[in-house]
Image (cartoon, rainbow, N blue to C red):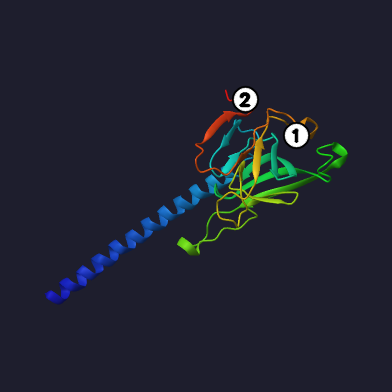
């Protein structure tokens, strides 16, 4: 009796295990289906997003599309603006296309004939791996003339390089409402420069009011 009961119990367990495997496979297929849908949605262009604020925090500035960000360190200047943001196959695969404007001669400034214009794409992918072994691929930086500043998605530009620890390296950033290099005026008294500052609380303003503070 005991032997037969044990065999029946064993078969009973296997039967339930088979059902569990089928259910698990079904759930996995549903998950894959959901990921596929999310990926297709993630590839939508973010250019027409309603994001029109500028944010200034301790370690970075977040710029909206189409507005010029000034960069300087000492007597060296550069300027850039984002053209579009978009996601890749997942929401963690992020891209940003931007233009940079580097004055060939700093003494001449941002005169059209003196500007070297470049287009580039900043990018990073979702993390692969676990903990400290996790890695992510992509450029993860904004290149503007000789400047190399860390980028952390969308319009985020940091006060330091991607391989540097957070800190003050003499980099200053100035968000502006300007959309064209012809508007750049380094002597404009309304321009406000920011640098890495642990005491600064996050500031959020409509980009058109970045100088008035309203």
Question: Is residue 7 toward the left or the right of residue 63 in the image?
Answer: left
Q: Earlier in the sequence, mark 1 or mark 2?
A: 1
Choose between 148 and 138: the one closer to the eye. Answer: 148
Q: Which residue in the structure is indicated by mark 2?
A: 209
Name the residue furthest right.
Answer: 113
Question: Is residue 15 toward the left or the right of residue 63 in the image?
Answer: left
Name the spot of residue 105 as percent of width and height, x first.
84, 45
For disc 2, the neighbor class at 10 Å (few under 14, some 14 to 19, many from 20) is few
Where is 67 relative to 122, above or below?
A: above
Q: Residue visible at 41% across and 54% down?
A: 26
Specify the label residue 169 is tagged with.
none
Name the spot of residue 85 as percent of width and height, x first.
64, 41
Q: Residue visible at 56% across and 55% down?
A: 165
Q: Which residue in the structure is indicated by mark 1?
A: 186
Q: Secondary structure at mark 2?
A: helix
Q: Secondary structure at mark 1?
A: loop
Name the residue furthest front.
Answer: 74
């Amino acid at each position: 009796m005991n032997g037969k009961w044990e065999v029946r119990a064993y078969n009973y367990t296997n039967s339930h295990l088979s059902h569990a495997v089928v259910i698990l496979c079904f759930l996995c297929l549903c998950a894959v289906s959901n990921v596929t849908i999310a990926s297709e949605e993630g590839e939508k262009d973010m250019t027409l997003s309603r994001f029109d604020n500028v944010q200034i925090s301790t370690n970075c500035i977040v710029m909206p599309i189409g507005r010029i960000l000034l960069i300087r360190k000492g007597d060296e200047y550069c300027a850039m603006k984002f053209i579009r943001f978009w996601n890749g196959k997942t929401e963690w695969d992020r891209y940003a296309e931007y233009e940079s404007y580097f004055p060939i001669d700093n003494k001449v400034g941002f005169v059209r004939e003196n500007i070297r214009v470049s287009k580039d794409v900043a990018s990073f992918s979702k993390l692969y791996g676990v903990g400290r072994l996790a890695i992510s691929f992509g450029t993860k930086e904004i290149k503007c003339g000789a400047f190399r500043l860390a980028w952390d998605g969308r319009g985020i530009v940091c006060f330091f390089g991607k391989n540097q620890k957070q800190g003050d390296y003499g980099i200053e950033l100035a968000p502006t409402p300007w959309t064209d290099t012809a508007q750049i005026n380094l002597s404009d008294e309304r321009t406000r420069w920011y640098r890495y500052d642990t005491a600064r609380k996050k500031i959020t303003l409509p980009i058109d009011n970045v100088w008035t503070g309203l």
